[in-house]
Amino acid sequence: MYAIFKSGGKQYRASKGDKLKLEKINNLSSEKVVFNEVLSVGDGADINCGTPYVKDATVEAKVLEEGKDKKIEVIKFKRRKNYKRTFGHRQHYVLVEITGIKLKKSTAKKTTKEE
């Protein structure tokens, strides 16, 4: 079973046991995180797509680590103008492990017309 969910403006495909590096979430370490914005849930040939989200679907994860990525160096340069600027950026991240994908199957009542 897999799910596609949204976090930090990006979409991730995950199954149980996967480890993902997401953008920073304001949580403490070793805490449980629940993602409610699930776009799609699939299990083999059975796929549930939401409009825009799947109702009653959640993805649960456990925070393993918080930290900063490698430094990205940004250079601005204009030739022959004596202009050069360099600076760097380190993005915060959260490493999570997917512990479960929950989907409550709705039991729609089918009505039949009796004549």
Image: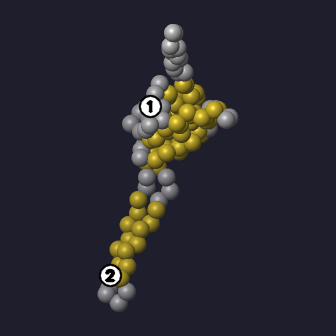
The residue positioned 39% from the left and 36% from the top of the image is 26
Looking at the picture, the colour scheme in use is secondary structure
Tag 1 residue: 36
Q: Quadrant of the N terminus?
A: top right
Tell whether label 2 touches label 1 (CB within 8 Å): no
Position of residue 68 relative to residue 66, above or below, is below
Q: Secondary structure at mark 2?
A: strand
Q: Amino acid at mark 1?
A: Asn
| Residue 33 visible, this orientation | no
The residue lying furthest to the bottom in this view is 80
The reply to whether residue 112 is visible in this rendering is yes
Closer-to-camera residue (42/6): 42
Residue at the extreme front: 115
* Numbered badge on residue 83: 2
- Identify the residue at image location x=35%, y=82%: 78
Q: Earlier in the sequence, mark 1 or mark 2?
A: 1
Kind of residue indicated by mark 2: Tyr
Q: Residues within 10 Å of mark 2 (few under 14, many from 20)?
A: few
Check disc 1: other Cα within 10 Å, few if <14, some if 14-19, many if 20+. some
Depth order, front residue of 6/53: 53
**Residue 37 in the image, given as x and y percentages of width and height:** 44, 35
Above or below, comparing residue 37 to residue 92 in the picture:
above
The residue shown at (46%, 47%) is: 10
The one nearer the camera, 48 or 14, is 48
User: Residue 84 at x, y = what percent?
Assistant: 35, 78
User: Whole-percent x and y of residue 53?
Assistant: 45, 35
> Distance of mark 1 from mark 2, alpha carbons?
47 Å
Give the x, y percent position of residue 108.
51, 18
Residue 11 vertical position relative to residue 97 in the rendered view, above or below:
below
